[in-house]
Amino acid sequence: MADYSFHFVLGFCLACYFLAQWLVSKDKLNVTNPTFKRFQRDYLFVYSLVIMSDWLQGPYLYELYSFYQYDENRIAALYVAGFGSSAVFGTFTGSFADRFGRKRLALVFCVMYSLSCFTKRFSSYGLLMTGRVLGGISTSLLFSVFESWYIHEHVHTFDYPGEWMADTFSKSTLLNGVVAVSAGLLSHVVAETFHFGPVSPFFVAIVFLVIAGVVISAMWTENYGADNDKAVEPSTNCLESLVHIVQHPHILLIGVMQSLFESCMYIFVFLWTPVLKPIHPPLGIIFASFMVAVMIGSSIFDHLFNAGQSAARILQTSFILMFSSLAISSVFIHRPFICFFAFLLLEIGCGLYFPAIGYLRGQHVPEEYRSAIMNWFRVPLNLAVAAVLLLMFGSQSSSRTIFVLCAGMSGIGILCSTLFSRRYPNDKKSSPGTEIFESV
């Protein structure tokens, strides 16, 4: 497939996205409250800054390690260190956020992730390993603290309707795709066009982290997972949050579904490049097409949710799309053209998944343990990704086998999401984190 064909696919994806946006505009939830719109805009601005800092590091991470002349096994160890540290230390970062404040831990994230980026300036393997550990911890903060802060402000500080959270999560997913495309282009410009080398995107990421830290310091108010007089030590909070997960089936199911979907997604991140490599595709265009597909999925979520479909049913659809994509890829592993279109299907599923799972977490996860529980959810997915990475880079397993394994995991996700949607079909009618939690 020639390069212009991939440009055609990107253009087609953009056309589908605008069509989806037009459909959404016909029945979109019309939230006109100016205070809420301002609050949502301020949160999404900070979210875009921190997500930009994260996306900027993706395109050139492997190339940077290769630039420092490390072989595949040592690079694999660096990747495993990142996922492993997120799995181990991530269980405590959420508890610290609930105990000492989400705003405070958001600022810690900005500092820690900046240090992680700064270590990329040096070729020392020890410093690079330290940076990966810091990056793993920072990732746990990124995917728990910011969402927890927003949900607390939405529900408790401003007492907005729970349904409005779906609008924010959908926009955050859409924004994530836009920022990802922008980050890919920006990293290419600074590294290749201006010839600053593969380390330059990491220093650009520091700039966005500094801006985010300044905005958070100036505009955010502090909130906690529990009242100050009821707060517990982080170790106790961590254990109690695990007990809550085990004792409440709906929370456990959400954690299982998140681990299944996101572990497959992260494994896919490492698979798509070598699978498509035989046809020498323009990686920037491919990446942009993936991100547009995510935005299409986000728009479809808007359309389905505003039409009355429950978030649990939409989550089930995302698993079906992922399963179909991975199954097709496992069968046609040596047909890169077919795999590419299957990958687009998976990315649409991701666009459906993120606003759906974010909404369900807001509805079902108890406020006082939110950050800790969200980080517990990430433990099995980080361990699964680390294990598969060891298999991949150790050449002990083929891509086909890994696709089959992931398809099986997404099949289990279909069963879990079906069970969840049958047991809790009316998630749109429940108050976030209270009624459902207390009734089980």
Image (spheres, rainbow, N blue to C red):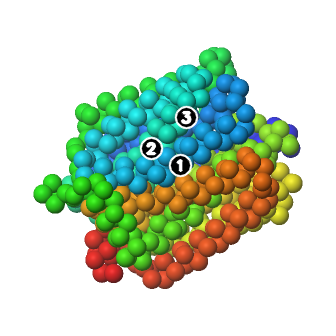
Question: Residue 208, percent across and down?
Answer: 44, 30
Out of 161 and 119, give the one closest to the viewer. 119
Q: In this view, does 287 lie above or below 66?
A: below
Question: Residue 128, percent across and down?
Answer: 56, 30
Q: In this view, does 184 lie above or below 147?
A: above
At x 30%, y 56%, the residue is 235
Circle 3 packing at 10 Å, graded few (<14), some (14-19), many (20+), is many
Q: Is residue 32 above or below residue 123?
A: below
Label 3 and label 2: CA atoms lie apart by 13 Å
Label 2, secondary structure: give it. helix
Q: Name the residue under label 3.
A: 129
User: Mark 3 is on which residue type?
Assistant: Met
Q: Is residue 237 above or below residue 193?
A: below
Out of 144 and 232, give the one closest to the viewer. 232
Quarter of the image where the C terminus is located: bottom left
The quadrant where residue 23 appears = bottom right
User: Mark 2 is on which residue type?
Assistant: Ile
Question: Residue 406, percent across and down?
Answer: 68, 63
At x 63%, y 25%, the residue is 198
First of labels 2, 1 by sequence position? 1
Q: Which mark is on residue 137?
A: 2
Label 3 and label 1: CA atoms lie apart by 12 Å
User: Mark 1 is on which residue type?
Assistant: Gly
At x 38%, y 32%, the residue is 111
Q: Mark 1 points at which residue?
A: 84
Out of 245 and 410, give the one closest to the viewer. 245
Quarter of the image where the N terminus is located: top right
